[in-house]
Image (cartoon, helix red, strand yellow):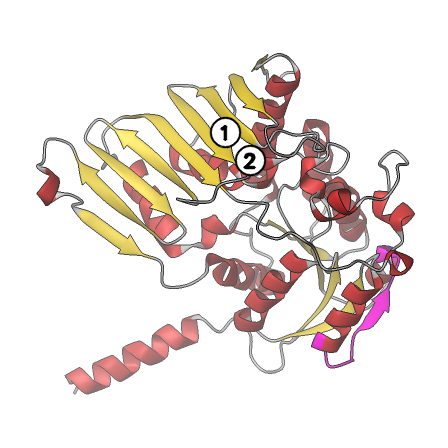
């Protein structure tokens, strides 16, 4: 007979079993390309996602290669040229390079028969998105985009509520993200003799090394797309997912450089996007971090406010003391679940939680905002070109 204790034990074992993607003999062989700070986070998640062996490491900066080889207990090989990693007997690669390398590296990995975890934004230009999609869909390899909110439990629950109509009609979504880039200065001294700057540049125009470009490459147009492809990309992916619409017709951008004059992209910005039947707004700056980042889905019946810590739902026509009517907290970093999903898809060959089209659409929205910024504050986009 099933009593309370046996029920709890059985339920607990079932829950634990559901988090185990592989058995002891199913260890994945992984290579990494771009061994920087973000790769540390990704491998921390991989450590909890399932058994894997770090086989090969590529980075153009020697100390980065050495640090990750130490992490592998000295077992992984190290390489300056990422293509040597693709020649190894590995199942998949995790790519965490600067943005301008994402598509070339991912396509080379797919051609080499490797599955790919590709950090966001998956593309550096709108045109690259089509090339990446074509490369994925013309083969049989798995590509998981680094849009981890799609695997985060409370984000999934929130999307279900929105799509079920719990908020009424949603016609405006507010997104925001504030960070403070002055916090990490001064940087740790860089050994330029251990850096292959020319290889780091890759397809970018030849230019002299600067600490600012190396550390804040996202804010230089040769290498990244600023906050709109770094931060906003995460939130607009949640919007696309919840609202079942991923192609803005137009964008407006009010932005400037108030603190970091050496950057190409603005450090303070407000943007607005027109989607079929609803609008999305974004605001943020890179010299103030109070409030962090999040989204607000504003509906006729209720508003849902969500970030990586959890969400709350506020009903219309209720006294302040009665709201929120529902709250949920995050109990686990979604990057772990996202990596679990990637590992599982390598084994089952099923479609990942964040397939290539989602990453391309999210990056595209950021690119469209940047085009608006470069063209006087407004840009109209058509999927037909």
Residue 76 in the magenta stretch? The answer is yes
Q: Callout 1: helix, strand or loop?
A: loop
The image shows residue 292 at horizontal and vertical percentages of: 43, 45
Q: Is residue 168 visible?
A: yes
Name the residue: 84% across, 68% down.
78
Q: Which mark is residue 48?
A: none
Q: Residues within 10 Å of mark 2 (few under 14, many from 20)?
A: many
Q: How far apart, in angstroms, are the residues tagged by discs 1 and 2?
A: 8 Å
The image shows residue 88 at horizontal and vertical percentages of: 83, 66
- Picture quadrant where residue 258 is located: top right
The image shows residue 171 at horizontal and vertical percentages of: 32, 23
- Compared to residue 39, the image places residue 304 above or below, namely above
Give the residue at mark 2: 362
Name the residue: 47% across, 21% down.
273
Horizontal side of residue 314 vs 385, given as left or right: left
Q: Is residue 2 visible?
A: no
The image shows residue 7 at horizontal and vertical percentages of: 22, 81
Are circles 1 and 2 on residues that touch, CB within 8 Å?
A: yes
Horizontal side of residue 99 vs 341, given as left or right: right
Horizontal side of residue 79 vs 231, given as left or right: right
Instruction: Specify the segment rendered in magenta.
Output: 71-83
Give the residue at mark 1: 246
Horizontal side of residue 336 vs 193, given as left or right: left
Name the residue: 70% across, 37% down.
224
């Amino acid at each position: 007979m099933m009593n309370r204790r046996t029920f709890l034990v059985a339920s607990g074992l079932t829950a634990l079993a559901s988090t185990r993607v592989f058995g002891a003999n199913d260890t994945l062989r992984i290579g990494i390309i771009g061994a920087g700070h973000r790769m540390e986070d990704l491998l921390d998640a991989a450590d909890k996602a399932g058994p894997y062996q770090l086989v090969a490491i590529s980075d153009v900066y020697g100390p980065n290669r050495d640090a990750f080889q130490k992490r592998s207990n000295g077992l992984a090989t190290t390489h300056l040229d990422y293509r040597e990693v693709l020649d190894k007997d590995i199942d998949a690669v995790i790519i965490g390079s600067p943005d301008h390398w994402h598509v070339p590296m991912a396509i080379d990995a797919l051609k080499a028969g490797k599955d790919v975890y590709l950090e966001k934004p998956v593309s550096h230009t709108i045109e690259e998105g089509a090339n990446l999609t074509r490369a994925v869909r013309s083969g049989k390899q798995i590509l998981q985009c680094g849009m981890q909110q799609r695997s985060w439990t409370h984000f999934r629950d929130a999307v279900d509520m929105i799509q079920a109509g719990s908020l009424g009609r949603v016609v405006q979504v507010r997104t925001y993200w504030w960070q403070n880039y002055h916090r990490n200065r001064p940087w740790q001294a860089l050994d330029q003799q251990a850096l292959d700057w020319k290889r780091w540049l890759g397809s970018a125009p030849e230019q002299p090394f600067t600490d600012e470009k190396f550390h804040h490459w996202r804010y230089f147009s040769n290498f990244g797309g600023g906050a709109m492809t770094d931060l906003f990309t995460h939130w607009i992916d949640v919007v696309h997912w919840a609202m079942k619409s991923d192609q803005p017709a137009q964008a407006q951008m009010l932005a400037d450089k108030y603190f970091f004059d050496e950057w190409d992209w603005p450090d303070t910005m407000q943007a607005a996007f027109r989607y079929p039947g609803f609008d999305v707004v974004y605001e943020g700056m890179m010299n103030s971090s109070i409030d962090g980042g999040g989204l607000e889905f504003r509906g006729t019946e209720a508003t849902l406010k969500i970030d990586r810590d959890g969400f709350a739902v506020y009903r219309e026509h209720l006294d302040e003391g009665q709201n929120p009517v529902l709250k949920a907290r995050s109990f686990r970093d979604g990057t772990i679940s996202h990596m679990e999903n990637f590992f599982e898809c390598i084994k089952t060959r099923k479609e990942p939680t964040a397939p290539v089209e989602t990453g391309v659409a999210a990056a595209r929205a950021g690119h469209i905002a940047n085009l608006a910024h470069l063209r006087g504050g407004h840009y109209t986009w058509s999927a037909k070109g």
